[in-house]
Image: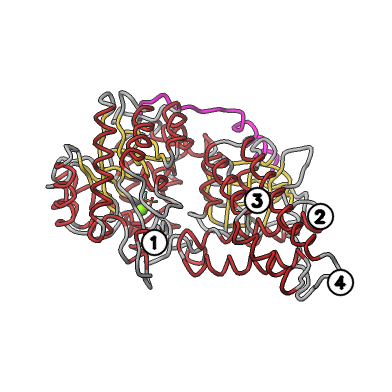
Amino acid sequence: MVTTNVVGIGVSPGRAVGPAVHLPDAVAEPPAGRRLPPGADRQAAVEQVARSAAAVRDELDAAALAAEGDAAALLHATAAMAADPSLVADAQQRVRDEHLVPERAVWEAADTVSADLEALGGRMAERVRDVVDVRNRLVAHLTGQQAPGVPVRAEPYVLVAQDLAPALMATLDPQRVVAVVTAAGGPTSHTAILARSRGIPAVVAAPGVLDVPDGTLLLVDGAAGTVTPGPSDDAVRRVRALAGAVRTFDGDGRTADGHRVELVANVGDPAEAQAAADSGAQGVGLFRTEFAFLDRTQAPDVDEQTAAYGRVLAAFTGRKVVVRTLDAGADKPLPFLHAAPETNPALGVRGLRVAQERPDVLEDQLTAIARAAAAHPGTTTWVMAPMVATVDETEQFVAACARHGLTTAGIMVEVPSAALLAGPMLAHARFASIGTNDLTQYTMAADRLLGAVAALSDAWQPAVLRLVEATALGGAAQARPVGVCGEAAADPALAVVLVGLGVTSLSMTPRALPDVAAVLGATDLATCRVLARRAADASSAADARAVVRAGLPVLDELGL
Ligand code: PEP
Ligand code: MG
């Protein structure tokens, strides 16, 4: 029996208590080479594959209808994969030609699709987990087993798993599953992002949790990344008391002594914009426009883009929206933009660099943004470019925006060179927004999608904090605002550090706004600065996190 704390990486803050319930074993692989008996009706077996695919797709679509936002979108995406004609046709072919039983044929066809996705790399490779999920559902359906899924229990519990497919994560009911702990996974995986957006405390990369027996009472701290088996009665009481407190954000971000910090939302899909506006966000600090381009063989036309961007601007009348131009490449591959495969896509033609090869794509996008802005004069529209690395690129982007009448053009700081040259760049650009997800990846040379380097992919790394500081100093020298829109802004303790380093706005998933606002509101600017200095001077990410958390008793009071 495990009695010591299990340590992992906290990816969704909040504390929860409940008995451990392990996710049931995955569907077993049907034996290789299992064939239909001689004389079996092969055509019927072929049709059975299509029927099961349709049934699984319908089940997932029905679950999507009962879900919201990210969860619904992910379930629909998985449903589409279940009905993927290439997967179904490949499996049917194997039944027809090799006489495989349908479940074995599906298994092998899914292996082929997975291998193809893995070869594409980036976000496509991440979808392998969805394919495996669909495969398991299909095999369960074909063999009459219970669909793999979340156990049903009368009392709320902590779900423990080796890993969790995003489609499964998306179906979790936060009233029933109070926290999630997985042995695998990284901080920027889909599962982590979903846990955060659904407000379920989560710890990933905690292999020790697999040794915890079913039913053991666990206290999960999704900020600290710890899992405590058999917590004291006192600790349990405190967590339960805090669970009843619902925090909201009143739309006014300030430190305890009144220093204003703009607290804004990240939006990735126009469908989420209204909910973000209702959350009190003071605007949108990062509107990711990739959604309009994903799964396309051609860029959407100007009219379609104008309508989509307009939906977000409409939801934020009277407030500001920062629209980011297309960030294609690396973890967001768009096949129609990349003619030749790259051996190292994260260092390749991505973000603003795409405009060199395809200036038409940027031109169309700026045209659409300018039209949407003109149609919504009540909203303040700013534009920024991703992956800017040089002063020349900054100048060219600002000039391109100006040609479209977009006068407030900024840069994302995601590459160390941009952090170091923030001053000269901000002589041209009107603002900067630090993308800590990529800035961390490029500073630490650690793939943001790879669980194996998750400890390096941590925005608490002192080197990353020093680059944030350099950027803020560059901004101050030019009297330009510098925000943060990476995941770091959603961590209340790190938010304090960022403000202390001179950051003027924080953009995050809307769910994080109340916690970040509460911690900033309880901390004065001088304390932010002292803690920021300690964090930037620490010798490791762990030390930086520990020294700051120790200086913020409010985190404990709020259960963060
Ligand atoms: C970032 O890199 O921190 C960022 C906000 O951009 P994205 O996550 O979309 O790459
Ligand atoms: Mg980025």
Secondary structure at badge 1 equals loop
Q: Residues within 10 Å of mark 4 (few under 14, many from 20)?
A: few
Q: Which label was assigned to residue 228? A: 3
Of the pair 55 and 384, the residue shown nearer to us: 55
Q: CA distance from mark 4 to mark 3?
A: 52 Å
In terms of sequence position, does the residue under pointer 2 or pointer 3 come before the other? 2
In terms of sequence position, does the residue under pointer 2 or pointer 4 come before the other? 4
Residue beneath label 2, please? 145
Q: CA distance from mark 2 to mark 3?
A: 34 Å
**Kind of residue sitting beneath label 4:** Pro
Q: Position of residue 217 (x, y in %)?
A: 73, 46
Q: CA distance from mark 2 to mark 1?
A: 38 Å
Magenta range is 232-253
**Kind of residue sitting beneath label 1:** Ala
Of the pair 31 and 457, the residue shown nearer to us: 31
Q: Is residue 432 magenta?
A: no
Q: Is residue 17 left or right of residue 352?
A: right
Q: CA distance from mark 2 to mark 4?
A: 21 Å
Residue beneath label 4, please? 37
Secondary structure at badge 3 equals strand
In terms of sequence position, does the residue under pointer 2 or pointer 1 come before the other? 2
In terms of sequence position, does the residue under pointer 4 or pointer 3 come before the other? 4
Of the pair 370 and 91, the residue shown nearer to us: 91
Q: Which label was assigned to residue 330? A: 1
In terms of sequence position, does the residue under pointer 3 or pointer 1 come before the other? 3
Badge nearest the viewer, 4 or 3: 4
**Residue sitting at 78 percent across and 49 percent down?**
215
Badge nearest the viewer, 2 or 3: 2
